Amino acid sequence: MHIRLAELAERLGVELQGDGNLMITGVSTLKDAGSGEIAFLANESYRKQLADTSAGAVILRPQDAQDLATTALVTDNPYLAFAKVTQLFNNRPLVPSGIHASAVVAETASVPSDCRVGANAVIGEYVEIGAGSEIGAGTVIGDHCVLGSQCHLNANVTLYHDVILGERVRVHSGTVIGADGFGFAPDKGRWEKIAQLGGVRVGNDVEIGANTCIDRGALGDTVIGNNVILDNFVQIAHNVELGDGTAAAAQAGVAGSTKLGKHCTLAGNAGVAGHLELCDGVFVAPKTVISKSISEPGGYATGTAQMPMNEWRKSATRFRQLDSLARRVQQLEKSKKD
Amino acid sequence: MHIRLAELAERLGVELQGDGNLMITGVSTLKDAGSGEIAFLANESYRKQLADTSAGAVILRPQDAQDLATTALVTDNPYLAFAKVTQLFNNRPLVPSGIHASAVVAETASVPSDCRVGANAVIGEYVEIGAGSEIGAGTVIGDHCVLGSQCHLNANVTLYHDVILGERVRVHSGTVIGADGFGFAPDKGRWEKIAQLGGVRVGNDVEIGANTCIDRGALGDTVIGNNVILDNFVQIAHNVELGDGTAAAAQAGVAGSTKLGKHCTLAGNAGVAGHLELCDGVFVAPKTVISKSISEPGGYATGTAQMPMNEWRKSATRFRQLDSLARRVQQLEKSKKD
Amino acid sequence: MHIRLAELAERLGVELQGDGNLMITGVSTLKDAGSGEIAFLANESYRKQLADTSAGAVILRPQDAQDLATTALVTDNPYLAFAKVTQLFNNRPLVPSGIHASAVVAETASVPSDCRVGANAVIGEYVEIGAGSEIGAGTVIGDHCVLGSQCHLNANVTLYHDVILGERVRVHSGTVIGADGFGFAPDKGRWEKIAQLGGVRVGNDVEIGANTCIDRGALGDTVIGNNVILDNFVQIAHNVELGDGTAAAAQAGVAGSTKLGKHCTLAGNAGVAGHLELCDGVFVAPKTVISKSISEPGGYATGTAQMPMNEWRKSATRFRQLDSLARRVQQLEKSKKD
């Protein structure tokens, strides 16, 4: 892949500054880029690297471009332009076209001729795959699943039966969609299984990381909105609903029947208890436990801040005594008044 | 699936109230059920939905049935009756009977004729599969494993060698049983591997969620009791023992050689350190770290409660100063006495 | 497997005490060992079991051997000697030699004749497998991957394209190496994907547990040093670098672009935020969140210590009032001065 800088500017719809004939052959960081590569400056804390970069061109904001001699693409959203450049330079090998001879595809399944189905993939009865989709090696798609066009399941993904994916849904390896939700009725000390009769519905333009789980609903479906992005190891329990544009970082989890609004963010290993509602625009800090519904947008946190262990031990000991400490302060205040 | 309400009452062993000839064609929630469906009321907080439900029949407690005109199944444990109804209406597609032509089954393995083995499954040497078991597509069973009757491994499960499952054990996709425990001896700054020579033994009527790990023992076995239920992403380290009826929600973890008693519950992302013992009936709150053995049943917790981030930051800062704060209160008390 | 104790002493390079002709047929714990088995004492808390053990021989320290009548192997590092003994007695069944007929290996891939490739494994274009490596059933290796000699990928592992493993790298089932890092640019409420153009490089003598994820770099590689050991469910985000000998226990996570030094330890479910640097020799306590870079070796922690839930609730309530409590103490101190 190589492209003239002027053409790149045009494709991205951004302003060109300097030599448009420069041939761009790759994308890199300010620190590592060579003379044929394009880099970007989106985060002010890297601004000092601008002076020393060997990049052939840099994507940056108008205010950062002003006193810069070097060639640049100028835009108000350099990170977005960078994203589009990475897509252009993406060299991911595709699964070969057609259905690999070793794949097992049910006769009742519908797989358009422009799909790519990898070795040892298994596609169940009455499955419908959308045009231009790619199914990785070893991936198993259960009966009655429906995938929209341009979906991409990487290798060793598992879809249980009756999972519906929208268009342009990407699923990474090891991820399981549609496994049984965790539902059991106690019966005199024994657990009686509640069969999970619902399914999973995923919107358009969704990305689901590796080794993530989205369980099927108990009754009714688990629902993932449009443009939701989930990282690795995310747990989405039965009957959860995630609003459009919501993001969950690695190891986050949402317990059963909880609804998240639009554009919420769960930081790494954040957890939300079951049967709650979070409004649009909630940010949950890393490793935070949300145990009550939230109706005000903004950030929420639990836990404490990082300390050396010997100091932490002292604070942790005092935490245990916190109620009595507060009562003692009350007592002091009272005796002062008297 | 459809069943007369009177027959359903008889199968469940519960009391019929109203029209026994009503044909039940599905199960749903009070809110969503239609006139041919049966719903249930187990949680008092949903009681207000009873007046407006369109359900053909409702499973509920005697006290909730009293002033109810509509058709009902009356029982002291409506949630249990509901569980049994879901099983009746379960429409999960089965793996086709017999061994799929693409599956690879060792000649020394024993697979009864009533088993179902999916496409591209791999069954190792000397494996014994119990009668009526179902092995999903792409699932790999290591040498010398033994599965009891009516086991169900979903697609893409991995069992290492010498894993023993009891009867009616269900394992969801992506789960790995019998991988090496995490054991290494330090040797002048290098890690020397401790080969994990034990196995894994799982009891009867156990359910194991998706993408969960149960490691094999270092010496001796990791042991999962009868009727244990594990959700997704549960980490069970080497030589852990879980007592009968113990439950672990998603992302919970138990470190090496720890023993949990019977009927313990680990809430989501709860963690228990290694080499501990927890007595029967312990409940561990979400994201709690248990670092000492527990000999009293009841609930245990660590962490703090949910706060808006700007308030949280103040408390977190003060937490660091907690020891000095406590000393200052002591000083004030002392000076008051003087 | 059986070996004379004298020969075992010689192989381990440790001192023999007692009958060198004793035939050792297995390895066990002090508590469970029989007369043909060898046990070990590495942890002083098990010293009391020494008197009652039925073990044929015990590996222990000189000071523990002094007043012991029974046969022993004496060494300053009994745990290391034990590790080596377990390797000797390891009876793990190997994947049969050669390439299984059902495996799908690209014509351009290089697989030396002494490798073992399991059933339904898939090896992509231009892959180079090192001599003596073992590839488990159902494992998928993407195009252009390079594996050093004596690597061992267990069943159902997934390597994306352009993943480089050193020599003697062991990867457990369900693990995904090289999936896309979690990178998206916000664009007026939509997420635009940043194609992940980097790869993953893993050093020599690395062990990677089950259901773990190491994401590929966005630009440049994610780098795992030599002799790193990762447990199950470990999340290594894009462009993370782990120094030699660093260890991460189950459910630990490191966010994007963070660098850990050598010989760091992340305890279970510890998490490190993105874009940080941790120096050599940092220990992070269980479930701790590291949100600032660390330049001093030693232990770090967040959170609180285990409490019964009703007491915990009181402390958690007071934690919310901690800032006001501290101000009230200040006030008391001030009024005392006045």
Image (cartoon, coloured by chain):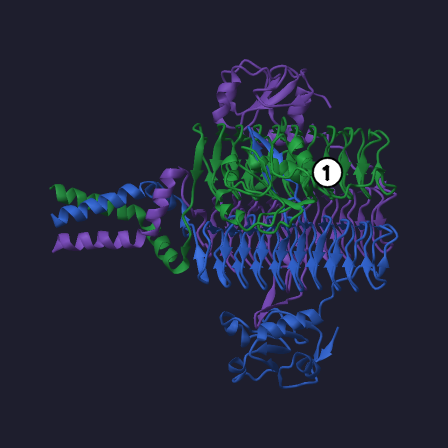
Chain colours: A purple, B blue, C green
Q: Looking at numbered disc 1 in the image, what kind of residue is underneath it? A: Leu
Above or below, C147 relative to B125: above
Residue A204 x/y as whole percent: 67, 47
Viewer-closest of A10 and C263: C263
The N terminus of chain A lies in quadrant? top right
Residue C141 appearing in the image:
yes
Residue C211 x/y as whole percent: 65, 44
Above or below, C179 relative to A50: below
Residue C178 appearing in the image:
no
Residue C155 x/y as whole percent: 74, 43
Q: Residue at x 17, y 55 (%)?
A: A334
Above or below, A79 relative to C93: above
- Report which residue position mark 1 lands on: C153
> Which picture quadrant has residue A78?
top right
Q: Is residue B20 left or right of residue A71?
A: right
Q: Is residue B201 left or right of residue C337?
A: right
Mark 1 chain: C
Residue C105 x/y as whole percent: 84, 36
> Which picture quadrant has residue A96?
top right
